Image: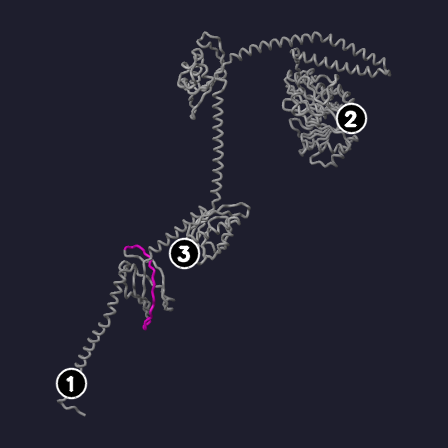
Amino acid sequence: METPPGAAPATLATLAAGIALLVSLAAGWAVSGRIRARAALRPALAAERRLAEIAAHIPGLIYRRTEFPDGTSRYDFRAGGLSGEIRDLPEMPVGSFGESQSPVCFEQEVVMSDGSRRWLRCVAAPMSLPDGAVVWDGLALDVTDLRQAEAALRDSESRLRLAQEAAGITTWDWDLESGRIVWSRAITGLPPLPDSAVDQPQVLDPLALARHFTTPCDRETALETVAHAMREEADLDFRCRLDQPDGSRRWLICLGRSIAGQQGRPARMIGILRDITPYLEAQEALRAAKTALELEVSGRRRTEAVLETLYATAPTGLCVVDPDLRLRHINQRFAALGTLPPHAYLGRKLGEALPAPLAAVLEPLCRRMMETGLPVQDQEAVARLPDGTGPERHWLVSLHPLRHPDGTLGAINLMLQDITESKAMEATLRLALEESRLAIAAKAKFFAAASHDLRQPVQTLFLFAHALHERLRDHPAQALVATMQQALEGMKSLIDTLLDISRLDSGAVEPKVTEFPLIALLQRLQADYEPRMAAKGLRLRLVGSQAWVRSDTLLLGRILGNLLENALKYTDRGEVLIGCRHRGGQLRIEVWDTGCGIPEDKQAAIFEEFVQLGDRPPTAAEGLGLGLSIVQRLARLLGHELGVRSRPGRGSVFSIAVPRAGSAVEAPQRPPLLIAGGTADRPLAVVIDDDTTILTALGILLDEWGWEVLTAETAPDAMGAIAGSRRRPDLIIADYTLDGPATGTDVVRDIRSYCNFPVPAIVLTGDTKPERALEVGRIGSHLLVKPVTPETLHELIRRLAAGG
């Protein structure tokens, strides 16, 4: 259908008007929609403003963060007290949180606008949008101060725990309602609680706890104390004992305080437990020290009081003088030298306090001591009192320095003793002593002059008694003659003893000291006393020495003879031994017996005149008990040390120490007579070794093999033993290494030279050098290297005895 020519413009106009109407309608609708949107957003904006106002007062940040699917994000909102101060906002820990749509809580360190760092604790909740974006609404609080406080608290707890451990303090916190207790064990050695109880809450029964930490005797008291503290809201304070597994006991102190709950009743109890054992031990030690100190102070006070009393009442005049010679302290005896009371002398000078003659003697001595500091000891002084014209008085003066702690001289202690009477007594005694000496000399001269006249009739009686004994042989009166002869023997002994003592007391005996071989004297004594010993059933043995000694041979012989007489007198069975011991530069000669012995309290008295021990009175033949007195006098005259030791019922040992000869006169001396060893029932062997254990062992072996054995530690001792036996040895066994310069080969040569016979010899040594075998071979002896078996030694001895 065709449109008329005039209709087209009208249609376009109508269409334009319609379009315009539609546009106007659309614009009106848009405006009204915006107005409605603004009206709808008005509450949200108000809420946002309100939220911003609230957030401004929060020490943190409120924010909304949107994370888009492409990985980008933006903060749509943030407000709070830190919103303008944070340079970098917190990053969200996305991932599993976003997928699970669960709220998150985390802490993160952020940088502030001023460059400082703060810690934020963030709590955020996610919300997913339809387009895949995730919106996080969160709150971030500044916890920097809280974290610092927590760190400070941890440090404080560490220091507290360290202090508790150092002080040995255990803390505990007991919740009374739940029964839970937190226990920190700092005391070492406590019985262990279960591990969970240490610094961890645990329900514990009070009875079980008391049983764990107290002894049975303290348990009831501890429980009553705890119950009272809980009931009365009182402080807890008690001590208890704890027994340790090792048997020791420790003391603990428990201090605590109850804390009331909301209802006013005790709800908690806190306290400490401390080991006070060291404190109590220290307290006990202090008490003991205090007691000891009090005793010491008391003792010193008593001592001071005693010294003060002694000072005041001393029979000697005592005073203390200062450097100006003024009296600072005096006693009663010193004050008696003047006319004033003791206290009136203090502060006065010596010249003012003492009579002038005495002061003139003492003042120079005091001044000299002040200058030199040297003490004056027992110096005699003479003064005429009171004014220099009276009788002469003698004084004994002593001055001793009294020094300050720094050593300087501060005062003088002066001692003044009147010895006038003592001097007079000394003169009297000196006169009496001189008269006594003259009387003793006269007595000695009388005995010396009468010696021949006394001995001559006794000698005549001896001769007639012997003749009468021969004429009355087999006569009934012969027993009477024998009794008379015994009486004559006693008379002779008494006369000899009295004359000897007289000569010693008068000083008529002068020692003639020479150097001589001791063995000759000992052999003579053995020959004299051996028959008499045998007649009484005793055995006399001699263990001599080849050493030379310095002494008077006659006087030393008299000493040893008297000791043998004493041994013969008091020994009823057994034996008597004369032996020698080397002691440095001396030779100690000993006489041993197996007699009745001497009590210790009588050992000094036996050397006095007319002292004899025993239950029965001595007979005339036994003498007057002067033998040991003579021994003591002779020993003093010779300067020899005399000794005795004894055990009642076991015997006695008398010894005399004689100096060895200064010159080495130790060369082997030929004895008077040596009988060949083969003439006896058993062969004789001499063993020399400085080890007593080996000596004993070899002696036992040789004795079992049928040998008689002489043992010695040195060559002189060996030769002395040979001389005492009067036999030539059949065998010598010597150790090569001996104490001293001599060797075993030297000993073999000396003994062979002494015996003038090539005695077979065996030398034992631990030295395996070839030179040792050559040295032993050159003297014709046999060498055995230690250790030697008894079989080897026995076989060699058997061959040597057979002449092999």
Q: CA distance from mark 3 to mark 2?
A: 114 Å
Residues at discs 3 and 1 in contact (Cβ within 8 Å): no
- What percent of the width, then of the height, locates residue 618? 73, 19
Label 2 environment density (alpha carbons within 10 Å; few <14, some 14–19, many ≥20): some
Residue 216: mark:
none
Residue ranking furthest to the right:
474
Could you tell which of marks 3 and 1 lies nearer the N-terminus? Answer: 1
Where is residue 696 shown, x and y percent of the image?
71, 32
Nearer the observer: mark 3 or 1; the answer is 3
Residue 677, label in figure: 2
Q: Where does the image place residue 483, in percent across and percent down from the top left?
A: 80, 16
- Decide if residue 670 is in sight here: no
Left or right side of 390 for 497: right
| Quadrant where the image shows the N terminus | bottom left
Q: Residue at x 81, y 13 (%)?
A: 466
| Tag 3 residue | 265
Query: How far apart, in angstroms, are the residues tagged by discs 3 and 1?
Result: 97 Å
| Residue assigned mark 1 | 14
Dot placed on the residue nearer the N-terminal end, 2 or 1: 1
Q: Alpha-carbon distance for marks 2 and 1?
A: 184 Å
